[in-house]
Image (tube, rainbow, N blue to C red):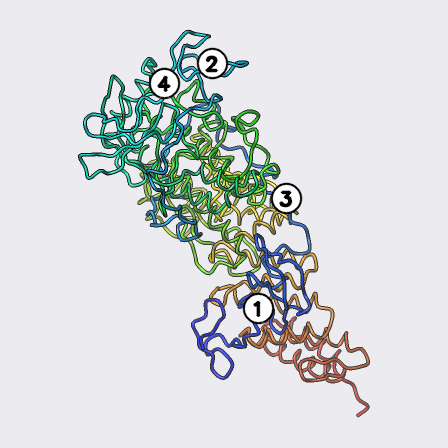
């Protein structure tokens, strides 16, 4: 049988792997979680402690996720509740800019990603929407509810019931005198433009009735006719004509297709593809009905999956110079296992400063009323849609119309810190603080989805994820240094990228060249920061960071370099502030989370550090080793032996840090263990650690020293052997003398010989 250890390609022969030497006994399940020589107590019971798991601990393991109760990724003995958003953060973006509303132009840094076929990007499963019979979707009674009747001219309430008088669907506004009409203009059987036979109304939108029809010229295919709300409303007429002009060029698989534009009895109609699914708003209503009338948000992973899937449609529109303007759950239709963006009535050119802007209260960005629509305002509507899909926010159209409620009022966002940080950036008050593009948002949202799914399943990541912004971390030991954090990937679009890549590897020589570049660009300044870090030149580092932030107050890479510099000089408080600011800019990236975890650990914010380490370990195999070491440090510091061993068990055998993890296991068992069983476990760990002779003897000597303390005047049992104090002294003496022979340091040799003499068993002979 194949070895079941993570990352090992060996085969079990005679009970042991022929590659890693680990036993193949099935009792070690779950693989990679158990502590050598120990099993979770079969009497352990109660709810599983894995985030998002609803299982019960039975016979020492969860009956749902299979994890033991003391898993490394489960919250340990201390309560982990504090979120990173509560920490201090370095000023960045609009908080640093000297002139409001001005942001330097920036090149996109995130490479485009290929769209996968099904919703969820292979990370999660979204149930398909059931098929809808178009004929059954027609409204039985086509009447607009009175609470939705608004004068198209002045916005006053019209057509409302008074006393015993019923409200009128057609009439004149009592405030401004403008005519209004909410009655359908088409009836079943009407033939529009001699081609489209009306079946009936489907719904009433912000710009009028929407009808189902058959195209008699194209095999009776189903189409939708979208008409005007009021022929006397000039703004609505202009918007409809704009649709005809704009949408002729729009052709994308995620966007409803426009077939034609026709007129009928002095009214205009857009003819578009019929999308026979359910909107996300209808999905929320169905969930509410099934929940007894109480709001039931979508699972976070499904909400993210829907938006990740639809975001390429926004990228496409923005690339054409078009803005969607009125995004909300109503305007995304799920058809089986795919999505469509519908209702393009508010689409406008980004250069259009004159036509009316259509939006919805609670979704529209605050600056639209004065500064107009933009890519940033579209990003705002996406963030607000995410909020509504994931949480019940009664005041999102009033008290919180333009602001984000605290995380503790949004359970899903309180549970997932990165999700809340994503929402804050999408809906930042200053539009320049939001994501630069829909693609940048999609990349970060995909990272948040990975984290949410990993947290829900509680299973350590077995695959690596390539980041477009950061290299993978290089941690191979428990002795942390700033160089082990992920490094920034160079910007290939920087004008001096080739020149920087050609510089000498020696950091001193490289720094000298970088101080005399052909041209001072962002890439040159960032490379100068790195060289300054490598040479310990804090003055050059500080100057370069300040120049970068003066040129662009939104340059988070400068703050990242400042955080590394703070770690280098032993200033965890400023490092924490810097990395927290970067995390806010890149909520889907793990690099700032790992860096922030390290800074929090050094600054004493251990609860936040543990939460971040667990998230990193669960999400990406590249981060398992550094996160495992971090968790082990935190837990060992508070005397949690089982927790520290479980954390070290995360480190895979393929990692360069595996040997270090085995050493630490033995060290923790010796230092924190309180009985012979722990010392026996330490010996078993050393059997498979493949250490050099000197390290092996050193650990064994420590074990026998501790065993001698436990034995006193009696005996102690290690494995199948019972050792008396005399036996242990003999082993210690032999070990010390062999260590002295292996040492190249005369002083150390002398010390070891003295220890051997001091521990030897004396006799009268």
Q: Nearer the viewer, mark 2 or mark 4?
A: 2
Residue 214, percent across and down? Answer: 25, 34
The Cα atoms of the two marked residues, 3 and 4, are separated by: 45 Å
In this orientation, which residue lies closer to the viewer: 738 or 211?
A: 211
Residue under label 4: 356
- Given the current orientation, which residue lies at the most extreme front position? 164
Q: Tell me whether circle 1 and circle 4 mark residues in contact (CB < 8 Å).
A: no
Circle 1 SS class: helix
First reached walking from the N terminus: tag 2 or tag 3: 3
Q: Tell me whether circle 3 and circle 1 mark residues in contact (CB < 8 Å).
A: no
Residue under label 3: 82
- Given the current orientation, which residue lies at the most extreme bottom position? 765
In the rendered view, would you say 70 is above or below 539? below
Residue under label 1: 662
Q: Is residue 425 left or right of residue 230?
A: right
Q: Nearer the viewer, mark 2 or mark 3?
A: 2
Q: Residues within 10 Å of mark 3 (few under 14, many from 20)?
A: some
Residue drawn at the location 77% of the way across and 74% of the way down? 709
The disc placed on residue 156 is 2
In this orientation, which residue lies closer to the viewer: 611 or 423?
A: 423
Residue 4, percent across and down? Answer: 48, 71
Q: Nearer the viewer, mark 3 or mark 1?
A: 3
The Cα atoms of the two marked residues, 2 and 4, are separated by: 18 Å
In this orientation, which residue lies closer to the viewer: 222 or 611?
A: 222
């Amino acid at each position: 049988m194949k070895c079941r250890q993570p990352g090992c390609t060996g085969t079990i022969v005679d009970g042991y792997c022929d590659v890693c030497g680990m036993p193949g006994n099935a009792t070690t399940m779950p693989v990679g979680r158990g502590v050598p020589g120990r099993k979770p107590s079969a009497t352990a019971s109660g709810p599983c402690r894995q985030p998002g798991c609803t299982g019960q601990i039975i016979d020492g393991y969860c009956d749902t996720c299979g994890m033991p109760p003391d898993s490394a990724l489960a919250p340990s003995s201390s309560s982990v509740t504090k979120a990173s958003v509560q920490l201090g953060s370095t000023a960045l973006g609009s908080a640093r800019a000297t002139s409001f509303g001005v942001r330097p132009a920036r090149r996109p840094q995130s490479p485009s990603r290929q769209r996968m076929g099904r919703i969820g990007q292979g990370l999660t499963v979204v149930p398909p929407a059931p098929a809808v019979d178009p004929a059954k979707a027609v409204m039985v009674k086509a009447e607009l509810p009175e609470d939705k009747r608004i004068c198209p001219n002045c916005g006053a309430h019209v057509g409302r019931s008074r006393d015993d008088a019923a409200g009128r669907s057609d009439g004149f506004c009592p405030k401004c005198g403008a005519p209004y009409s909410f009655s359908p203009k088409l009836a079943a059987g009407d033939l529009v433009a001699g081609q489209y036979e009306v079946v009936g109304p489907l719904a009433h939108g912000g710009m009028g009735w929407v009808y189902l029809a058959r195209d008699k010229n194209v095999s009776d295919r189903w189409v939708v006719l979208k008409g005007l709300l009021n022929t006397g409303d000039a703004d609505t007429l202009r918007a409809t004509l704009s649709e005809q002009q704009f949408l002729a060029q729009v052709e994308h698989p995620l966007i409803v297709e426009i077939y034609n534009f026709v007129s009928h009895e002095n009214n205009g109609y857009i003819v578009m593809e019929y999308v026979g699914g359910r909107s996300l708003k209808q999905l929320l209503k169905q969930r509410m009905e099934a929940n007894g009338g109480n709001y039931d948000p979508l699972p976070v992973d499904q909400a993210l999956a829907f938006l990740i899937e639809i975001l390429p449609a926004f990228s496409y529109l923005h690339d054409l110079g078009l803005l969607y303007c009125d995004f909300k759950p109503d305007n995304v239709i799920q058809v089986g296992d795919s999505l469509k963006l519908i209702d393009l009535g508010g689409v406008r050119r980004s250069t259009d400063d004159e036509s009316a802007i259509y939006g919805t209260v609670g979704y529209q960005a605050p600056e639209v009323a004065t500064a107009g629509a933009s890519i940033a305002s579209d990003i705002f509507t996406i963030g607000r849609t995410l909020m509504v899909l994931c949480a019940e926010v009664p005041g999102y159209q009033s008290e919180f119309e333009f602001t984000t409620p605290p995380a503790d009022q949004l359970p899903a966002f309180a549970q997932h810190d990165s999700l809340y940080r994503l929402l804050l950036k999408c809906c930042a008050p200053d539009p320049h603080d939001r994501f630069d593009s829909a693609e940048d948002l999609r990349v970060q949202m995909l990272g948040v989805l990975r984290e949410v799914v990993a947290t829900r399943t509680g299973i350590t990541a077995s695959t690596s994820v390539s980041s477009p912004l950061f290299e993978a971390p290089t941690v191979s030991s428990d002795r942390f240094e700033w160089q082990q954090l992920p490094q920034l990937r160079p910007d290939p679009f920087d004008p001096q990228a080739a020149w920087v890549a050609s510089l000498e590897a020696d950091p001193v020589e490289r720094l000298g060249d970088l101080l005399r570049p052909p041209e001072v660009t962002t890439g040159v300044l960032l490379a100068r920061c790195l060289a300054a870090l490598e040479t310990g030149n804090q003055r050059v580092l500080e100057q370069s960071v300040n120049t970068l932030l003066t040129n662009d107050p939104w340059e988070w890479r400068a703050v990242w370099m400042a955080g590394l510099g703070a770690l280098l000089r032993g200033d965890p408080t400023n490092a924490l502030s810097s990395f927290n600011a970067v995390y806010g800019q890149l909520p889907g990236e793990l690099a700032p989370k790992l860096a922030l975890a390290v800074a929090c650990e050094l600054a004493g914010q251990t609860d936040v550090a543990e939460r971040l380490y667990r998230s990193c370990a669960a999400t990406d195999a590249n981060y398992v080793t550094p996160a495992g070491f971090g968790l082990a440090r935190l837990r060992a510091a508070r005397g949690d032996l089982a927790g520290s061993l479980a954390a070290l068990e995360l480190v895979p055998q393929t990692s360069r840090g595996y040997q270090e993890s085995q050493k630490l296991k033995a060290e923790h068992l010796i230092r924190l263990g309180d009985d012979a069983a722990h010392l026996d476990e330490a010996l078993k760990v050393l059997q498979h650690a493949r250490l050099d002779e000197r390290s092996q003897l050193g650990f064994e000597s420590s074990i026998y020293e501790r065993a001698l303390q436990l034995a006193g005047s009696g005996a102690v049992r290690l494995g199948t052997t019972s050792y008396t104090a005399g036996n242990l002294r003999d082993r210690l003496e032999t070990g010390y003398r062999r260590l002295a022979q292996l040492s190249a340091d005369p002083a150390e040799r002398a010390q070891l010989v003295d220890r051997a003499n001091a521990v030897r068993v004396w006799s009268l002979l």
